[in-house]
């Protein structure tokens, strides 16, 4: 990191060095078509894009954009996406759907409907192929803004996160250091490039470390293992729901372990399916990560312990080595619990609190760049944590810090709700039903009801098409009764055709809470406390 800081080069320059080390090696492979490109060829394609857009954006010797402007990329996962991004890294900021974006770049092979307003450049393959001469790059430094990646928007509107070149590089080199990822690994990526796990953790291994990446336009559970076998993939990038989708596929004793995947790297794997997943598919290591695209509170599960997102030293002396703190917070009001001197109450091992990242502006790995919207950035900063005047990034996640130092994800602060004077963790309630055959998807959230104090739990469930509501209702009630206190049992069960999710399969619980529960009473059931079972609501 210090070496690259001294050289002050862009990620585009770093990729050129990687391409020079591995010119003929496969760089990117498209799973659907089998089309592939070497490092040398990708670098040449990036140069073609540089010349192509240099001509497109200059009219009467006046350039339509400058290095301080932003360009939007509207492409699916493909080789051109990476080549285009690499070239723009050397010239300008890139982003997606931002109101300040000056020009959008689109590959219109799929007949995209283009808005009448705005500036759009359509990629013309014939013109592009004639632009093979070297492109004169602008000097972009290590601290310049590289791109704007968007948050998932699980609780509100997606926000544009500022990613600088040094942050991208730091996240790229973490793979070899922490998980022994090397240039011989082949990564399988099915998440969209605008997600940090794909665009940074995945593509970053190719750019910085020289790995080959295999990309698919969209995740497909039925094609997943066939792709891994066909292209000899050794590492798969995931988020939690991907693993659940794979488990629901029909078992095949001969094929399930017939692959070369040695590690799954990602975030959000539920503890309730962790061991079932690794045992069924023979996965030796789960590299579970925790962290937000914009945040500095990042941790990793380095010793393969089931259900763990990271480790925090339990001895005060070693806390100096990390920026992570667990602070006490009221999960309902979201108010931080403070000592008489106004500083935060710091959790001890065995306690649950919000994970925060102490901001050290002179340490690039511990900065908090935030969002384009300054007001949204300020909302994520808490002050006077350990000493008066200090600041920390507030993650909004509740974490349990066990007595051995391991960290366990509990819930999102906005998702935990209060019922009958007790706090209910939606994640813990959801975990009770994990593994029940016939349940395709589920989400638990709290809703307010007129004249009632606190909130009541709602469990929205998508069933397998072959099942009827009444076939599984009794099993759900028994599971809840056996594993949850009375106050945590969802008041309502709502069977539905689908659950609202983001583009990376995260549940949009904020949207669910806003939808009226009683608009359609069909397939709605209420918990009868006396009979201890769910009954049709009327």
Image (spheres, helix red, strand yellow):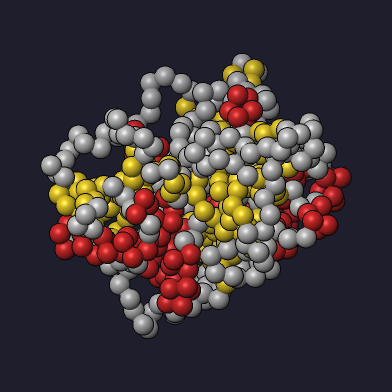
Residue 232 point in image, percent of width and height: 51, 72
Could you say which is closer to the camera, residue 104 or residue 486?
486
Q: Nearer the viewer, residue 279 or 74?
A: 279
Q: Quadrant of residue 41?
A: bottom right
x, y percent for residue 412: 50, 45
Q: Is residue 242 above or below residue 292?
A: below
Q: Nearer the viewer, residue 188 or 430?
A: 430
Q: Is residue 143 above or below residue 498?
A: above
Going 52% across and 35% down the picture, which residue do you hit? 333
| Left or right relative to 236: residue 404 | right
Relative to residue 525, is residue 33 drawn left or right?
right
Closest to the observer: 454 or 291?
454
Q: Residue at x 73, y 35 (%)?
A: 340
Q: Residue at x 83, y 57 (%)?
A: 317
Q: Quadrant of residue 108?
A: top left
Residue 253 seen by the camera? yes
Question: For this view, does 176 lie left or right of residue 419?
Answer: right
Q: Does residue 230 appear anywhere in the picture?
A: no
- Residue at image coords 67%, 66%: 404
Of the 4 image quadrants, the one containing the C terminus is top left
- Residue 254 percent location from the top left of the image: 37, 83
Left or right of 388? Residue 56 is left
Looking at the picture, does residue 473 appear above or below residue 494? Answer: below
Q: How many marks?
A: 0
Coordinates of residue 265 in the picture (x, y in percent): 56, 62
Residue found at the far bottom of this picture: 254
């Amino acid at each position: 990191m210090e070496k690259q800081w001294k050289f002050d080069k862009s990620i585009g320059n770093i990729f050129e060095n990687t391409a020079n080390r591995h010119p003929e090696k496969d760089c990117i492979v498209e799973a659907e078509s089998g089309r592939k490109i070497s490092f040398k060829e990708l670098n040449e394609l990036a140069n073609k894009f540089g010349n192509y857009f240099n001509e497109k954006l200059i009219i009467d010797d006046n350039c339509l954009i400058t290095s301080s402007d932003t360009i939007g990329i509207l492409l699916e996962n493909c080789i051109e996406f990476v080549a285009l991004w690499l070239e723009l890294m050397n010239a300008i900021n890139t982003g997606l759907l931002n109101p300040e974006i000056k020009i959008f770049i689109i590959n219109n092979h799929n007949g995209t409907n283009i808005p009448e307003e705005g500036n759009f450049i359509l990629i013309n393959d014939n013109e592009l192929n004639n632009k093979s001469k070297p492109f004169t790059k602008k000097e972009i430094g290590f601290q310049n803004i590289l791109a704007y990646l968007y948050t998932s928007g699980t609780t509100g509107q997606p926000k544009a996160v500022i990613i600088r070149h040094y942050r991208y590089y730091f996240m790229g080199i973490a793979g070899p250091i922490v998980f022994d990822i090397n240039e011989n690994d082949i990564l399988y990526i099915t998440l969209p490039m605008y997600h940090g796990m794909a665009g940074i953790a995945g593509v970053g291994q190719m750019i910085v470390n020289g790995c080959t990446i295999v990309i698919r336009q969209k995740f497909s559970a039925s094609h997943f293992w066939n792709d891994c076998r066909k292209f000899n993939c050794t590492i798969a990038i995931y988020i939690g729901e991907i693993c659940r989708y794979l488990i629901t596929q029909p078992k095949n004793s001969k094929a399930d372990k017939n692959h070369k995947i040695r590690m799954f790297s990602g975030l959000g794997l539920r503890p309730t399916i962790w061991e079932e997943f690794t045992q069924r598919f023979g996965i030796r290591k789960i590299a579970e990560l925790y962290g937000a695209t914009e945040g500095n509170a990042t941790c990793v599960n380095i010793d393969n312990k089931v259900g763990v997102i990271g480790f925090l030293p339990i001895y005060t002396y070693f806390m100096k080595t990390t920026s992570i703190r667990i602070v006490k917070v009221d999960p309902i009001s979201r108010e931080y619990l403070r000592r008489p001197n106004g500083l935060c109450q710091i959790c001890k091992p065995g306690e649950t609190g919000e994970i925060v990242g102490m901001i050290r502006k002179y340490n690039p790995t511990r900065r908090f760049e935030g969002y384009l919207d300054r007001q949204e950035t300020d909302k994520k900063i808490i002050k006077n944590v350990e000493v008066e005047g200090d600041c920390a990034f507030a993650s909004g996640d509740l974490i349990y810090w066990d007595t051995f130092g391991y960290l366990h994800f509990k819930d999102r602060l906005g998702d935990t709700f209060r019922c009958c004077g007790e706090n209910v963790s939606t994640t813990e309630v959801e975990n009770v039903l994990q593994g029940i055959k016939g349940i395709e998807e589920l989400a638990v959230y709290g809703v307010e009801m007129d004249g009632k104090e606190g909130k009541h739990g709602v469990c929205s469930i998508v069933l397998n098409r072959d099942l009827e509501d009444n076939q599984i209702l009794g099993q759900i009630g028994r599971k809840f009764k056996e594993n949850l206190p009375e106050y945590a049992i969802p008041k309502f069960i709502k069977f539905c055709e689908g659950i609202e999710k983001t583009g990376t399969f995260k549940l949009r619980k904020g949207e669910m809470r806003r939808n009226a529960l009683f608009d359609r009473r069909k397939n709605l059931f209420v918990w009868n406390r006396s009979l201890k079972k769910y009954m049709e609501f009327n």
